Amino acid sequence: MLLPKFEFYEPTSIQEAIDLKKKYRGKAKLMAGGTDLLVHLKKKLVTADHLISLAKIKELSQVQQAGDTLKIGTCVTMSQLSKSAVIQEKFGAIKTASDNLGTHLIRNRATLGGNVCNASPAGEALPSLIVYQAQVRLQGPEGKRKIPVESFFKGPGKTDIHEGEILVGFQLPLPEKNYGAHYLQLGKRKSSEINVVNVAAFVEINPADQTVKTARIALGSVAATPIRSFHAEDVLTNKAPGEAVFYEAGEAARHKDCQPIDDFRGTAAYRRAMIGVLTKRTLETACKLAMAQ
Ligand SMILES: Cc1cc2nc3c(=O)[nH]c(=O)nc-3n(C[C@H](O)[C@H](O)[C@H](O)COP(=O)(O)OP(=O)(O)OC[C@H]3O[C@@H](n4cnc5c(N)ncnc54)[C@H](O)[C@@H]3O)c2cc1C
């Protein structure tokens, strides 16, 4: 299968990229690593007369800590995330998600922004970004805006990005003390496979009485977008962590929060069962990490 013909642009500033996108509007596509886009072009799922690569815009490929905030540029690759000291130390669930995506070759090209803009309900990094309360930073002809990543997804392949806008990066609050987070995924085989289900959890423990102060749980591949599991979070809040509570939270996620479908990767019933198991397991590890701090 050959790629169709297109004009290729490599702007070196965000403004230049915005101007090109404005000039060619619907006939142009933005490209980060190209691991989704080029496949979609080959399969004729999308068309583009003009491809605007973001790879030469240096500021989009940086991970920067500023005070109590972490900024991740949209073109930061999964390999870069895996190796980043601050990601390893403070954002373990993002590190695990980055390690899990595809193969080494894919991880060297696949970007965080591309994973988010592709908006697959099974997208590897999406549940972790949600539980860390990441904000999406957008820039376009009308200026800049920021929205929670949780409200960015509108359906499979659909996002809240406006015509002409570029996702420039992410902003995450640095977690403080007594917290732990974890990410787990289940695929039909170990690597390079779209997830059957994936779950991220973040918990903060109240050091005074060792109960759960805050819990955020995000589920992937069980609805049209990644979703929060609010019922499971309610089960945990103000309770002492333990086997019975983790199980109850898993059951809440399984029966009350997810709306899976049957497809060739798994039945809805299997997905529900696995959401229960993965929710319980992510919580066990997240709470263990939080209590060890
Ligand atoms: C063999 C293989 C294995 C894979 N395994 C996995 C996996 O395990 N888990 C997983 O989640 N995914 C997987 N993928 C899918 C893909 O690698 C990821 O979704 C990746 O993160 C996409 O990033 P990218 O930089 O390549 O995006 P691109 O392909 O460059 O872009 C993806 C989409 O986002 C748009 N876009 C990109 N950047 C921006 C921006 N800054 N602003 C606005 N729009 C933008 C593009 O126009 C395009 O529509 C796999 C793909 C392949 C080919």
Image: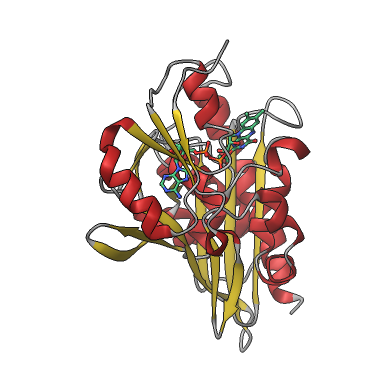
Is 24 left, or right, of 194 in this rendering?
A: left
For the C terminus, give its image quadrant.
bottom right
Is 288 left, or right, of 156 in this rendering?
A: right
How far across and down, in percent of the image, does residue 229 sit? 45, 52
The residue positioned 74% from the left and 26% from the top of the image is 189
Instruction: Out of 221 and 76, give the one closest to the viewer.
Output: 76
The residue positioned 58% from the left and 10% from the top of the image is 1
The residue positioned 25% from the left and 45% from the top of the image is 163
Instruction: Out of 147 and 281, give the one closest to the viewer.
Output: 147
Please tell me whether residue 277 is drawn above or below residue 234 in the rendered image.
above
Please tell me whether residue 171 is drawn above or below residue 155 in the rendered image.
below
The residue positioned 48% from the left and 23% from the top of the image is 40
Which corner quadrant of the image does residue 264 belong to? top right
Query: Quick check: which quadrant has ligand 1?
Result: top right
Tell me if residue 288 can be seen. Answer: yes
How far across and down, in percent of the image, does residue 32 sit? 53, 44
Please give the count of numbered marks on the rendered protein: 0
Is 172 left, or right, of 179 in this rendering?
A: left
Tell me if residue 249 can be seen. Answer: no
